[in-house]
Image (cartoon, grey):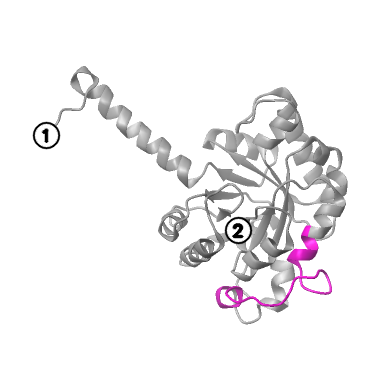
Amino acid sequence: MRENTLKKTWARGGVAVSGWLSIPSAFSAEVMAHQGFDSLVIDMQHGVIDYQTAVGMLAAISTTPVVPLARVPWNDPAHVMKILDAGAYGIICPMINSRSEVEALVRACKYPPRGHRSFGPVRASIYAGADYVDHANDQLLVLPMIETAEALKNIDEILSTPGVDGAYVGPSDLSMSLGCKPRLDQTDPPVVEAQQKIVAACKRHGVVAGIHNATSGYALKMIEAGYQFVVLASDSRFIAARAAEEVSAVRKSAIGGKVPAY
């Protein structure tokens, strides 16, 4: 089976830098896959991506060594199993609040006897190799999202569950749950404290801490804090930011703040 290089990176104490895909396009996924990321996450929760488009994006990513992951819409076995069959090498699952919920997630990700994932790796066996079923349980990642006050309260129960590889912080939902404004790169004390609590819990249980970041500067701070999986913005945010920057530069330098017509 094709190696999950994220596991290898984390096993030696390294950091993985990931991108985030919300645009429903195989071409944009391929472009992102050639920018040096260790992994890319196809966002099927808040991204405007359906299953068929996600399959094309997975195929585009597979032209590179980048590890393909997916955030599913919810903790639903149907969503989890289907995108794993398509070749995702790990699942990020939103709104996990208890041990029972994360146990259900793990079962959906694992073949028997460790879970109840149905057999049918229609594309996964092409991408990963003919021996996929023999190694999938050990190679694929299970990353529950910690993004509520309830999840914080149950953090040790969640992260001590067998089969969990790490925790992924959703800063915006976590912020709202703690009574703060939803945003990335948080500086509000309750959220900062919660993020520190999560990374400490991950260390206690020997799993990886991951977090979504708006900027590289904040991602570097999170790495210093102990996070080993940092995601940078998203494809749509990169396009918007770069386009706005270029348009602004032209307008500011044009006479009278207007671009002359040619």
The quarter of the displayed image where residue 175 is located: top right
* N-term mark: 2 or 1: 2
Whether the residues at callouts 2 and 1 have beta carbons within 8 Å, the answer is no
Q: How crowded is mark 1: few (under 14 residues within 10 Å), some or many (20 or more)?
A: few
**Is residue 15 toward the left or the right of residue 33 in the image?**
right
Give the image location of residue 247, x and y in percent.
Answer: 30, 32
Which region of the structure is painted magenta? 105-127
Picture residue at 63% right of the left edge, 58% below the top: 6
What kind of residue is marked 1?
Answer: Tyr
What kind of residue is marked 2?
Answer: Leu
Picture residue at 70% right of the left edge, 31% below the top: 176
- Above or below, 174 relative to 72: above
Residue 243: which numbered mark, if any?
A: none
Residue pointed to by mark 2: 69
Q: Residues within 10 Å of mark 2 (few under 14, many from 20)?
A: many
Residue pointed to by mark 1: 262
Picture residue at 48% right of the left edge, 65% below the top: 56
